[in-house]
Image (cartoon, coloured by chain):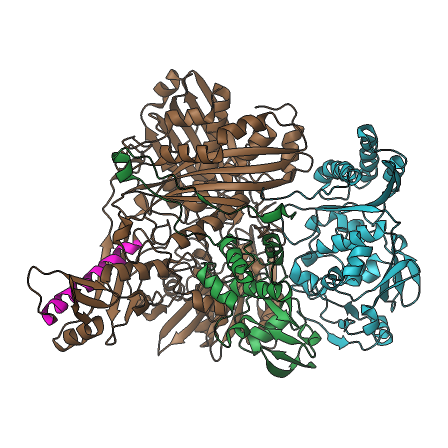
Chain colours: A brown, B green, C cyan
Amino acid sequence: MQQDSFHVVGSPTPRVDGYDKVTGRALYTDDMSLPGMLYAGCVHSRQPHAIVEVDPTPARSVPGVVAVLIEKDFPKPQSRYDWFYCTSHPRYRGDVLAVVAAETPEALEEGIAAVRVGYTKLPAVFTVADALSPGAPQVRAEGVALGEDGVPDPERPGNIFPASYKPLRKGDLAAGFAQADLIVERTYDTPYVEHAYLEPESVLVSPEGADGVLIRASSQQGHTPQDFVADALQIPMSRVRAVSTTVGGSFGSKLELVGLMCGRAAVAMSATGRPVKMTYAREDSILESTKRHPFTTTVRIGATADGKICAYQASQVENAGAYNNQAPWMNIRARVHSAGPYDIANISTDTYAVYTNNTVPGAFRGYSSPQVIFANEMAIDELADELGISVVELKRKNLLRRGSITATGQQLVHETLLVDMMEDILRDTRYEEKRAAYAAEAGVWRHGIGLVTAYRGAALGGEGVDASGAMMTGMQDGSFVLRPSLMEFGQGLNTVYAQIASEASGVALSDIRLEPVDTTVMADSGLTVASRGTAQGGQSVRMAGEAIRAMIEETARAMLDAAPDERIEVRDSIAWIEGRPDRSVRVSDIWTMRRYTGRQLSTYQWYSARPLVNDDATGQGEAFQTYAYGVCVAEVSVNTHSGEVIVDEVSAYHDVGHALNPALIRGQIYGGILMGMGFGLYEEYRLEQGRSFDDNLDAYLIATAKDAPLVNIRLYECDDPEGAYGAKSLAENATEMIGAACALAVKHAIKRPVRKIPLTPEYILELLAQGEACV
Amino acid sequence: MIEVSFSVNGAAHTLRVGPGERLIDVLRGRLGLTGTKEGCGIGVCGACTVLVDGRAENACLVPAASLEGASVVTVEGLSTDGLDPLQQAFLDHHAIQCGFCTPGLVMSARALLDENPEPTEEEIRTAIRGNLCRCTGYEQAIAAIASVAGTGARALLDEQAGLIRSSARLEAGVPFARTPPTSTPAPEGGDAR
Amino acid sequence: MKAGGYLRAASLADAASARARGGIVIAGGTDIMVKGRSRNIYADKVLVDVSGIGELHLVGERGGAIEIGAACTLSGLCADRALRERLPLLVDAMEHVGGVQTRNRATIGGNVVNACPASDIIPALMVLDASVRTTARTIPLADFFVDCPHCLKHEGMYVRSCLFPDAASKKTVLEPGELVRSLIVPLPRAGSRHLFYKLARTQNIGLACVNLALIGTLLGGVVEGLSISMGGLFPRPCTLDGCSAVLRGTSADVSTLDRVKAALAEKLAAESGALVDYGYKSRVAPALLADGIAAFMAGETLERKRRI
């Protein structure tokens, strides 16, 4: 894509929502109030598995408490998404037993404390190992057992979540291993991770009109609150309207929990006839919201002595928690990327989730990729160690290139920059020189450097057909309203949509106003996930802009009396005959002309990505329309006496296809780097018998400004036809490599094998105590 | 209930507050000033940072009853007469994503520059250490603050540098443009953390 | 937060009698407001705000010691150039407490009376041989605290879940109605050097995992006087006199440091039953102590320059 031919996309346009955010004018859900509004909250289970008897009467007599709802007060206690709005059979400590609504926050707190709960405890399991062992209590009726062959056995009951099983089979694994001169088998573990967005969840549900319901919610999704409320109240969805608000971060979390909160608030609204706001305290947010799936990955990798990988086998097993909604989709991605960005002819992977009475994981930036990349890149590093060759040589011999066949049998037909990016980063960071120098270090502080190469299927891929709508409506004065169907929640989507719409239509950026996602206006276009918002979601915005441009050109041609061979240019809300800027007309005048001739200057467009063909039984076929490539080098210093790790420098090079807004991209990368550092080094939501004390930000630590390393970013562009204006995806790519890179750097610094993250100081000292260096 | 008189953004208030009522409850719940946010309730995230007599404080930890005679400034008070230079700088440097930490961060920065107009990069990081952000990685906010400070502690980031184009060059046999990656310059003096 | 009442005490006498009636003293509130947040522990307590009592804000030098009013905020003290010059170790320790927002409200008296085992200020005051001046008496800091093994069992020692709503009555020797007026800190000997280090998992503004405060003098490269205190480890603040004794008269060479580590390890072993992170802390504390002493001998700090 030749950048010089674009006027708006490709520029670091300031955020369209920046002014409101920096002045404090932007309204997040908890900032909103309505007359007569009640404050609602939940009673959470104190047991991980029990049958409860809930007595609401003491709470009902607390002054200011207006309603106390228990399971029988809910028309449909279980949501369509597996979790319960309200239950008398809690299966994890985040399950809700009662919902209280009160006149004031103080009365609410008293009311919640006054609800009496009697528990009859039931047997519970918490670890995957325990859940898979014979005789383990069955957490969910639909769970199945693990077969002898390492594959779920649908005929026997157990704790594997059957829909989550996603196998991948490529080539002939046995033949592959038979060729191998060396086979390495290792197991790796990753933790539960908390999203830790700064804004705790908040929903405000109110009556609208005679029998309608209006939802404002801190939701990553515009449409799912509507879905949950209609479900909870058992009313037609057409009576339920969700209008998006400013959302203070999400990273994949504000989906199920927010939906459940909307359902609970809606039932309380229905019971009282009054608007209901439910805002969670941080402790409630951490207790009940989803987490990153912990993965236990066993990798068996075979290579010939010269370093060519000939076989790759893996089991990727997640702790699903007590309910689960995401694993079946997430595991589609996990199996595609399980063997990493390597050209391997024979691959067999089994990916599945196991029910336990733990906190429930869900979608989290990356959607399995940070966990998969950690295990895969660590295994590659250990393979290099065992083979006695450098990991750089191993990568050079095996990385995917243009024309390579991926793990799913898909040929990479578009530009594949991966190897070139790796060579650049090796040179820029002096990786090999440093590895050699650090290997010889003695002293308390040791340096380490780690390299990760990654690829990421852009957008939804095989998870569903990527389709979305956009509406662009002109006004008499030449200003436009752009209605998206995918959500802004901090990543800058509204800004990039304004840019795309402006570029495509020729309407000035300052004349385009983004409106919230409104379920009565826009069709459900699926979730704002998978980093699809710009690349795929932007296609419908582009189409809308192009449709507007066509209308402008048509009328301008007539108004300017242009000759048939004369081109019409449109930019900054002016249309003119190419080469004749004196012959021009404003878009506002074009609107007027069209309106009086019975035509509109508005459009609704729907985009649908080309369908992908793949086989669910083997995972073979086209997994994604295109792939984005990334390489990363992390440099650390480790104090071998205390286990402290300082991340000195991170270099992150990303193939973004086309950088539609480089400033937004950089911001995503900086934030993604700190999030990834946490994943590798210090973030862990620790559960013991289904309970955690890491329920506020004093215990669950995220990076501060003083933790940030020196950051080097390089963006690569290429010609890729799949995404809007050539964009690929970036949001998840920005974080997925970092944890693995930090872990590799620490491994090299302390010269001990690393099989688990986070690499806390405690764990590092344990590893160091294990005696002789391994590499 | 305790009667207390204090000013918020220059406006005088006399209120009867509960003994444990927090400044953040007064601001958000009673005065309709929702720019100050609650992220954790325990004084760790800094989203509720306001100025009390010019000092950055977490409004979730300030008893309203302790504010007799105090002067409180919130983010709304920064833009009564056009944007504060810090706010403009945050916009110019793309220092905002979800925006929830932004008011608190801007207030901490305001307090810093009021006391120390020419901070080093390390001093900036120390001043905002108690303001957590999950989206931005802090880099662009620090550039914004440094640009207002005018210390040159941070070079303005060149947003367009570091873009490499591939296809045409590869096909023509021309290697990638050797523009250096855009990196955060090392701090002057290498101050200890 | 729920509280039973709020009294802005005009004088120390008012505050003392309110305290004697069961009130809870509050100064900056950075501990009280967090402890009381989601538990109703102060619902029937009167909060006695002492921050307006003038004499609690005085800082003065007299008779070779500096007296610091209990209600002085940490940031106010850190900005005091004369104090930084006279008591650099104390200022160093205070600068490590929380973030700017915390230090703008937290007070030196509040920190001492709260008596958290992971306090950053208390170890510094201990090695400085500070005393506590109350409304009734003056007590050496070393005699101010009572053993609190429960705190060591407290995972993470978070303020939010602190076991003691009224730390003054349970963790110190303060009598009902007795308030702390000031800390009296003798000036260190001429030529003293010091070291402070706060070990934590990240650069977060929370409590230390383990911290270290040292002050002493060298004579001809040999330890002349030395006082050491470490936080996050013991049921009561203490100075590591056994370790100091090993070091006195030595140049703190490797074998001496090994003996120091062993002395600390032995003292720590008594806490193995109570200290929740004993596995990690028993490894890191002796190493931190030895590294700290080595840096102290070399006139360096343990702070690692980041971002090189």
Residue B50 on the magenta segment:
no
Q: In the drawing, does residue A686 fall left or right of residue C279?
A: left
Using the rendered image of the protein, determine whether residue C114 is visible from the camera's viewpoint. no
For image coordinates 63% across by 61% down, the residue present is B42
Pick the front one: A18 or A32? A18
Of all residues, the one furthest to the left in this rendering is: A564
* Residue at image coords 80%, 59%: C83
Quarter-of-image position of residue C228: top right
Q: Which is more toward the observer, B50 or A348?
A: B50
Most foreground residue, A516 or A108: A516
Q: Give the overall secondary structure of the magenta segment.
A: helix
Specify the segment rendered in magenta.
A537-559
**Residue A635, placed above or below residue A115:** above
Locate residue C190, reporting x and y percent: 88, 49
Q: Is residue C224 shown left or right of residue A430?
A: right
Where does the image place residue C29, in percent across and percent down from the top left?
Answer: 71, 66
| Residue A531 in sight | yes
| Above/below status of A490 relative to A520 | above
What number of labels is visible? 0
Q: Is residue A551 above or below residue A718?
A: below
Image coords of residue A514 (percent x, y)? 34, 66
As drawn, is B102 to the left or to the right of C20? left
- Please determine whether, in this image, residue C111 is positioned above or below residue C295: below
